[in-house]
Image: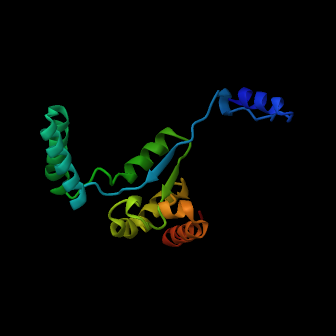
Amino acid sequence: LRTLLNDVLRRRGQSPVDYPPWPNGSRFAVALTHDIDSICQWTLRGFLGAKHRLAAALARGDMAEARFEAIGLAEGVLKHKLNGTDPHWNLDAVLEHDRRHSEGSTFYFFGKRSDPLDGHDAVRYRNHLPQMLGMVGEAGAEIGVHGSLRGSEDGEHLRQEVWELERSGQCEI
């Protein structure tokens, strides 16, 4: 990629860039990011969605998909709902995996959800946001703002989202 970029710069009459080598003689690097959009799969909306997908698969005669959805619903009820767990509430496991296997990641959180397409269960998300930000901050990982749909079109709204996120986690974004 460096060679390609420098070739483009030369063709444009610009000076090539002298990039420092990757650490340990590596030929490339990977940036690992996590968008923290949903923290709870098994809400009423989650159950209804799975029920709808199961019914649609059965109506189409897609038994493989129906089986997948039925197993997911059974796990949702028997394993997670009854035990008070949820497969989407796994930030501690992600942070532990990140600590063991990488040089660090960036975690993107919503500062404010102002559109239904930004995700469901905004109240639960808002209530857990300080805890999640604290976990990521204590792990030494980078925190960023996951801009909302409205924030992508309105710079002032995006600035407010950053402020809300900083206020929620008492951290700098």
Residue 173 x/y as whole percent: 59, 62
Q: Is residue 17 left or right of residue 100?
A: right
Q: Position of residue 144 (x, y in %)?
A: 55, 57
Question: Which residue is nearer to you in this view: 172 or 57?
Answer: 57
55 vs 143, left or right, is left
Asked which colour scheme the image uses, the reply is: rainbow
- Numbered-mark total: 0
Q: Is residue 36 visible?
A: yes
Q: Nearer the viewer, residue 149 or 89?
A: 149
The residue under the point 51% across, 67% down is 165
Give the quadrant of residue 6: top right
Quadrant of the image for the N terminus?
Answer: top right
Q: Position of residue 43 (x, y in %)?
A: 24, 60
Observer able to see residue 43 = no
Q: Position of residue 60 (x, y in %)?
A: 16, 37
Q: Is residue 43 above or below residue 16?
A: below
Q: Is residue 76 above or below residue 14?
A: below
The outermost residue toward the front is 60
Q: Nearer the viewer, residue 17 or 86?
A: 17
Measuring 20% from the left and 49% from the top, which residue is drawn there? 50
Q: Residue at x 83, y 30 (%)?
A: 10
Q: Quadrant of residue 14?
A: top right
- In the image, taking residue 128 as reference, residue 151 lies left or right, namely right
